[in-house]
Amino acid sequence: MFADWLFTGFSILSVLGAIGLVIFRHPMNGAMSLVITLISLAGLYALLSAKLIFVIQLIVYAGAIMSLILFIIMFLNVQNDDLPNEKDRFLYLIGGGVVLAPVFFFLKKIVQSIPGTEATIVGNGFGGVKEVGLVLFKDWLLPFEIVSILLLVALIGAVVIAGKRRMSK
Protein backbone atom coordinates (compact mmCIF):
# COMPACT_ATOMS: atom_id res chain seq x y z
CA MET A 1 0.00 0.00 0.00
CA PHE A 2 2.75 2.44 0.98
CA ALA A 3 4.73 1.41 -2.13
CA ASP A 4 1.76 2.37 -4.29
CA TRP A 5 1.71 5.85 -2.78
CA LEU A 6 5.46 6.20 -3.27
CA PHE A 7 5.16 5.06 -6.89
CA THR A 8 2.39 7.57 -7.54
CA GLY A 9 4.34 10.38 -5.86
CA PHE A 10 7.59 9.65 -7.72
CA SER A 11 5.70 9.32 -11.01
CA ILE A 12 3.92 12.64 -10.57
CA LEU A 13 7.16 14.37 -9.54
CA SER A 14 9.04 13.01 -12.55
CA VAL A 15 6.34 14.11 -14.98
CA LEU A 16 6.05 17.56 -13.36
CA GLY A 17 9.84 17.94 -13.53
CA ALA A 18 9.81 17.03 -17.22
CA ILE A 19 7.01 19.51 -17.88
CA GLY A 20 8.94 22.17 -15.98
CA LEU A 21 11.99 21.45 -18.12
CA VAL A 22 9.97 22.28 -21.21
CA ILE A 23 7.96 25.20 -19.83
CA PHE A 24 10.55 27.23 -17.88
CA ARG A 25 12.31 29.86 -19.92
CA HIS A 26 15.46 30.36 -17.86
CA PRO A 27 18.05 27.54 -18.17
CA MET A 28 18.65 27.39 -14.39
CA ASN A 29 14.97 26.70 -13.70
CA GLY A 30 14.94 24.04 -16.42
CA ALA A 31 18.06 22.41 -14.97
CA MET A 32 16.51 22.30 -11.51
CA SER A 33 13.41 20.68 -13.02
CA LEU A 34 15.68 18.08 -14.58
CA VAL A 35 17.24 17.43 -11.17
CA ILE A 36 13.76 16.77 -9.75
CA THR A 37 13.04 14.36 -12.60
CA LEU A 38 16.32 12.48 -12.15
CA ILE A 39 15.85 12.12 -8.39
CA SER A 40 12.27 10.92 -8.92
CA LEU A 41 13.49 8.33 -11.40
CA ALA A 42 16.03 7.16 -8.84
CA GLY A 43 13.15 6.68 -6.40
CA LEU A 44 11.30 4.59 -8.99
CA TYR A 45 14.42 2.45 -9.45
CA ALA A 46 14.57 1.96 -5.69
CA LEU A 47 10.95 0.78 -5.71
CA LEU A 48 11.91 -1.76 -8.39
CA SER A 49 14.65 -3.13 -6.08
CA ALA A 50 17.29 -2.16 -8.65
CA LYS A 51 19.87 -1.03 -6.10
CA LEU A 52 22.76 -0.53 -8.53
CA ILE A 53 20.77 1.55 -11.01
CA PHE A 54 19.32 3.58 -8.11
CA VAL A 55 22.80 4.44 -6.83
CA ILE A 56 24.18 5.15 -10.31
CA GLN A 57 21.20 7.41 -11.05
CA LEU A 58 21.78 9.42 -7.89
CA ILE A 59 25.58 9.63 -7.99
CA VAL A 60 26.27 9.94 -11.70
CA TYR A 61 23.25 11.67 -13.20
CA ALA A 62 21.60 13.63 -10.39
CA GLY A 63 24.95 14.31 -8.74
CA ALA A 64 27.92 14.64 -11.06
CA ILE A 65 26.38 15.47 -14.42
CA MET A 66 23.81 17.89 -13.03
CA SER A 67 26.49 19.60 -10.94
CA LEU A 68 28.49 20.11 -14.11
CA ILE A 69 25.47 21.45 -16.02
CA LEU A 70 24.51 23.82 -13.19
CA PHE A 71 28.12 25.02 -12.92
CA ILE A 72 28.19 25.77 -16.66
CA ILE A 73 24.89 27.63 -16.51
CA MET A 74 26.11 29.69 -13.54
CA PHE A 75 29.46 30.30 -15.27
CA LEU A 76 27.68 31.63 -18.37
CA ASN A 77 25.61 33.95 -16.14
CA VAL A 78 22.57 33.93 -18.41
CA GLN A 79 20.31 36.92 -17.78
CA ASN A 80 16.71 37.34 -18.91
CA ASP A 81 17.87 39.91 -21.47
CA ASP A 82 20.14 37.28 -23.07
CA LEU A 83 17.26 34.88 -23.73
CA PRO A 84 15.45 35.04 -27.09
CA ASN A 85 11.99 36.54 -27.29
CA GLU A 86 9.56 33.64 -27.69
CA LYS A 87 6.15 35.15 -28.33
CA ASP A 88 4.45 32.01 -29.66
CA ARG A 89 6.06 29.62 -27.19
CA PHE A 90 2.81 28.51 -25.57
CA LEU A 91 1.18 27.96 -28.96
CA TYR A 92 3.93 25.48 -29.75
CA LEU A 93 3.38 23.79 -26.39
CA ILE A 94 -0.35 23.52 -27.04
CA GLY A 95 0.33 22.21 -30.55
CA GLY A 96 2.69 19.60 -29.13
CA GLY A 97 0.04 18.59 -26.60
CA VAL A 98 -2.54 18.21 -29.39
CA VAL A 99 -0.14 16.09 -31.44
CA LEU A 100 0.79 13.89 -28.45
CA ALA A 101 -2.78 13.46 -27.14
CA PRO A 102 -3.63 10.54 -29.49
CA VAL A 103 -0.39 8.82 -28.49
CA PHE A 104 -1.31 9.26 -24.82
CA PHE A 105 -4.79 7.80 -25.29
CA PHE A 106 -3.41 4.92 -27.36
CA LEU A 107 -0.88 4.05 -24.65
CA LYS A 108 -3.56 4.41 -21.97
CA LYS A 109 -5.78 1.95 -23.87
CA ILE A 110 -2.90 -0.51 -24.16
CA VAL A 111 -2.05 -0.29 -20.46
CA GLN A 112 -5.68 -0.81 -19.47
CA SER A 113 -5.90 -3.90 -21.68
CA ILE A 114 -3.01 -5.60 -19.86
CA PRO A 115 -4.43 -8.21 -17.48
CA GLY A 116 -3.79 -7.51 -13.83
CA THR A 117 -1.45 -9.92 -12.10
CA GLU A 118 0.12 -9.99 -8.70
CA ALA A 119 3.72 -8.79 -8.71
CA THR A 120 6.29 -11.34 -7.66
CA ILE A 121 8.85 -10.43 -5.06
CA VAL A 122 12.38 -10.61 -6.41
CA GLY A 123 15.20 -12.34 -4.59
CA ASN A 124 17.58 -10.63 -2.20
CA GLY A 125 20.37 -10.41 -4.77
CA PHE A 126 18.35 -8.75 -7.54
CA GLY A 127 19.77 -5.49 -8.83
CA GLY A 128 23.01 -5.67 -6.86
CA VAL A 129 26.51 -5.04 -8.17
CA LYS A 130 27.49 -8.70 -8.14
CA GLU A 131 24.40 -9.86 -10.01
CA VAL A 132 24.64 -7.15 -12.66
CA GLY A 133 28.36 -7.84 -13.07
CA LEU A 134 27.79 -11.56 -13.50
CA VAL A 135 25.14 -11.03 -16.17
CA LEU A 136 27.27 -8.38 -17.88
CA PHE A 137 30.43 -10.47 -18.03
CA LYS A 138 28.80 -13.88 -18.65
CA ASP A 139 25.92 -13.25 -21.03
CA TRP A 140 26.93 -9.88 -22.50
CA LEU A 141 30.74 -10.14 -22.64
CA LEU A 142 31.14 -9.70 -26.41
CA PRO A 143 28.87 -6.61 -26.71
CA PHE A 144 30.55 -5.14 -23.61
CA GLU A 145 34.00 -5.57 -25.16
CA ILE A 146 32.84 -4.17 -28.51
CA VAL A 147 31.53 -1.05 -26.76
CA SER A 148 34.81 -0.78 -24.83
CA ILE A 149 36.84 -0.93 -28.05
CA LEU A 150 34.51 1.59 -29.72
CA LEU A 151 34.93 4.03 -26.83
CA LEU A 152 38.72 3.54 -26.93
CA VAL A 153 38.82 4.27 -30.67
CA ALA A 154 36.67 7.41 -30.14
CA LEU A 155 39.01 8.58 -27.37
CA ILE A 156 42.11 8.03 -29.52
CA GLY A 157 40.41 9.84 -32.43
CA ALA A 158 39.57 12.82 -30.22
CA VAL A 159 43.18 13.03 -29.01
CA VAL A 160 44.54 12.84 -32.57
CA ILE A 161 42.13 15.52 -33.82
CA ALA A 162 42.93 17.79 -30.85
CA GLY A 163 46.65 17.27 -31.51
CA LYS A 164 46.30 18.20 -35.18
CA ARG A 165 44.38 21.37 -34.30
CA ARG A 166 47.03 22.33 -31.78
CA MET A 167 49.86 21.75 -34.28
CA SER A 168 48.14 23.82 -36.96
CA LYS A 169 47.89 26.89 -34.70
Image (tube, grey):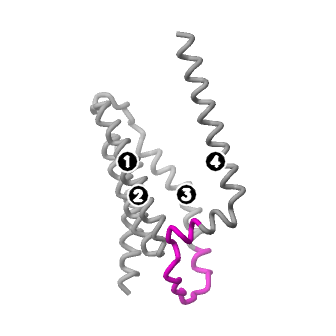
Which quadrant does the N terminus fall into? Answer: bottom left
| Residue placed under numbered mark 3 in the picture | 100
Callout 3 secondary element: helix
Q: Is residue 10 magenta?
A: no
- Dot 1 or dot 3: first in sequence order is 1
Specify whether 80 is left or right of 53.
left
Residue at point 62%, 36% (across, down): 154
| Residue placed under numbered mark 2 in the picture | 38
The image quarter containing residue 59 is: bottom left
Callout 2 secondary element: helix
Q: CA distance from mark 3 to mark 2?
A: 23 Å
Residue at point 39%, 35% (across, down): 86
Residue at point 64%, 47% (across, down): 148
Residue 98 visible in the picture: yes
Q: CA distance from mark 2 to mark 1?
A: 9 Å
| Residue placed under numbered mark 4 in the picture | 148
Badge nearest the viewer, 3 or 2:
2
Q: Nearer the viewer, residue 27 or 74?
A: 74
Q: Which residues are magenta?
A: 109-133
Q: Which residue reaches farthest top?
A: 169
Which secondary structure type mostly characterizes the magenta part of the structure? loop
- Dot 1 or dot 4: first in sequence order is 1
Image vertical order of residue 101 relative to residue 88, above or below: below
User: Where residue 144 sits in the image (x, y, percent)?
Assistant: 66, 55
Residue at point 44%, 65% (across, down): 54
Residue 78 visible in the picture: no
Asked if labels 1 and 2 touch by Cβ distance under 8 angstroms, the answer is yes
Q: CA distance from mark 3 to mark 4?
A: 37 Å
